[in-house]
Amino acid sequence: MTDRSKEYIKMCDCPEIQEQERDGHNSYFVCGEHHLDMTKDADEYFHHLIKCKEKLIWLPRQDQLQEMVWGKLGDYCTNKISSLAWGVWDFYLRADDNYYPDSMEQLWLAFVMKELYSKIWDGEKWKDIER
Ligand SMILES: [Zn+2]
């Protein structure tokens, strides 16, 4: 089940994620109340962009989030899958005891934001981790 909740949309609506490289033809977007799935209907997406003035927000899938962080992880492992698994597990272990992400997408997104930007989600916005 892919997370398309209001919470996930809010978490994705930040420059760090929206400015990432992405495969536009293979992605899922929301704008206002509209949901646009490029994998299903690219024409609808382009027609929509012309007439709608709402802000477009990309909702990355798990594999897209994993690509963002892959290659930028520390020395977990040379194997890609193992490295990602170790990385996210290490992140989860160090998180607050009360950290229960609502979805795998939210977990991977939080991991990406921590690894690449040293930010954590406070329930409303991304904030810098205090050192
Ligand atoms: Zn729209």
Image: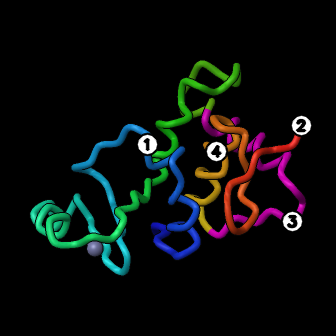
Residue at mark 1: C-beta within 8 A of ligand 1 = no
Q: Is 31 on the left-hand or right-hand side of 52?
A: right
What is the image's colouring? rainbow
Mark number for residue 113? Answer: 4
Q: Nearer the viewer, mark 4 or mark 1?
A: 1
Residue at x 66% of width, y 51% of height: 110
Q: In this rendering, would 26 be left or right of 97?
A: left
Q: Amino acid at mark 4?
A: Met
Q: Which region shows up in magenta?
A: 84-102
Circle count: 4
Amino acid type of the residue tagged 1 in the rendering? Glu
> Which circle's residue, 4 or 1, is located before the other in the chain?
1
Secondary structure of residue under mark 1: loop
CA gap, disc 3 and disc 4: 18 Å
Residues at discs 3 and 4 in contact (Cβ within 8 Å): no
In percent of width and height, residue 59 lies at: 43, 59
Label 2, secondary structure: give it.
loop
Q: Which residue is mark 1?
A: 19
Q: Secondary structure at mark 3?
A: loop
Residues at marks 4 and 1, CA–CA distance in whole angstroms: 13 Å
The residue that mark 3 highlights is 98
- Residue bearing the label numbered 2: 131
In the drawing, does residue 68 fall left or right of residue 78?
left
Query: Closer to the camera, 18 or 103?
Result: 18
Q: CA distance from mark 2 to mark 4?
A: 16 Å
Q: CA distance from mark 2 to mark 1?
A: 26 Å
> As shown in the figure, which amino acid type bears the numbered disc 2?
Arg
Residue 86: percent from left, percent from top: 70, 36
Q: Amino acid at mark 3?
A: Asn
